Image (tube, helix red, strand yellow):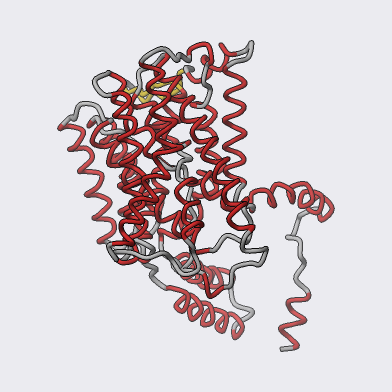
Amino acid sequence: MADSTSSSARISSDPPGSWPRIRQLARRAFAPIERFLAIEASSSVLLLCAAAVALIWANSPWRKTYAALWKAPLGFRLGRFSFEHDLHFWINDVAMTVFFFVIGLEIRRELERGELSTLRRAALPLAAALGGMLVPGCIFLLLNWGRPSVSGWGIPMATDVAFAVGILALLGRRVPPALRILLLALAVIDDVGAIVIIALFYSSGVSAGGFLILSVGLTVILLLQLLGVRTPWAYVPPAVVVWAGTYSAGIHSTLAGVALGLLTPARAWFGPRGFAETVDASVAVLRMHSGQDEREVVLHLKEVERARREAVSPLERLEHALHPWVAFGAMPLFALANSGVSVGQVSFDREPLRVFLGVTLGLVVGKPLGVLCCSWLARRARLASLPAGVTGSQAAIVGTVAGIGFTMSMFIAELACPAGATLETAKLGVLVGSAVAALVSYVWGRVVFARRGTRSPRASDSEPRASTSA
């Protein structure tokens, strides 16, 4: 033990060749950024800032540069083959594919061992999510029936989980963990519904050739899994083929991300116990032969690295790695590119007004009404029950916060509405409806949790861990 202690004491905290003073200054400089990224509500704050910048920029004297930026061509050429689109396409159809991939990972995990793993556990969020999609859609349909704008019925049906979780985080430690898990389960089912709606109603004409390309990519992925290939990089080429297949088939290409997420293995190979046993065995060998060749050390380290990588499932590993890129990259970039509503193009005349009212009322009124009514019916029918430690007034917060439909609603608006006054007015409806829903949720949450006092919820009140949603 003494030898081990003296040996570890000789190891410097700074790697060879580094400048300790510079490393110390760098740690101090990046510490505030690291603390910001560790805060749960940081993603929603960054989204809000990106949306605000887009709104100001699109209505400033430099508004032409805002429009020109997203129309800038970007692509590549390989021999006679070229693939070129504007920057807006690369954000909405390529970067957002990663966002949908993370959604697919979350759905896969919840189906494997989360809140959707059994019908009993899924009953309440399933009923709440169905109500939260149907009622807003019906409100929009009632206001726009018989008009071309009726195609936007899917806009108010979505929930932005980043903003929703951010509101709960702002309410502090008084929020029961089970309430957060209920919201996340509802949001996952909501995402499934939005994905189905995009696939069925907002995809262009279907091409058989594209489906053939898609099938080839999926077949290669399944074959690699049968061969036991666990390296994520090996799946990148067939994943690109799957994306190209959906793009060629006329299905919205972001759905490729969902399909790839659902195909990701959800079970660990070594697991924590296998990792510990492998590390113990390798460390024992290295201690017995401390003077051995470094090439032999590398072999042991490779085995330890494989055990470390496979201590958790590929699903957990990918979700953990991609979550910061989605939360602090793809989603704010999407908000910056799509939230620039030009006030000069917004119209409240006839059809655009009906779109605005359909979206706003769908989010502010339809969402909580649908969530609360359908969850109440499920409980009355004894199909579901509230989680332990959650009251009815607290569950109402889930209904109001589900009305924040920012990212996915904006995405569907881009697909459903033609460019011009209708699209700009629909976007404004999403912004206004989401802002009102967020404000109502925060105020109602403060009122509800003020009744409970300031104590933190007991650990016994909590459910299994919540998902790390994008």
- Residue closest to the eye, 439 or 232: 439
Whole-percent x, y for residue 229 in the image? 33, 59
Q: Residue furthest right?
A: 21
The image shows a total of numbered marks equal to 0
Q: Residue at x 52, y 11 (%)?
A: 344
- Note whether 182 is above or below 428 in the view shown: below
Q: Quadrant of the N terminus?
A: bottom right
- Note whether 166 is above or below 47 in the view shown: below
**Can residue 234 be seen?**
no
Whole-percent x, y for residue 21 in the image? 84, 53
Residue 60 lies left or right of residue 191; in this view the side is right
Q: Residue at x 38, y 49 (%)?
A: 371
Q: Residue furthest bottom?
A: 1
- Residue closest to the eye, 367 or 167: 367
- Note whether 106 is above or below 114 in the view shown: above
**Can residue 281 be seen?**
yes
- Residue closest to the eye, 126 or 261: 126
Q: Residue furthest left?
A: 208
Figure quadrant of residue 360: top left
Whole-percent x, y for residue 407 in the image? 46, 36
- Residue closest to the eye, 369 or 159: 369
Q: Residue at x 36, y 45 (%)?
A: 370
Figure quadrant of residue 126: bottom left
Residue 172 lies left or right of residue 181; in this view the side is right
Whole-percent x, y for residue 147 in the image? 27, 18
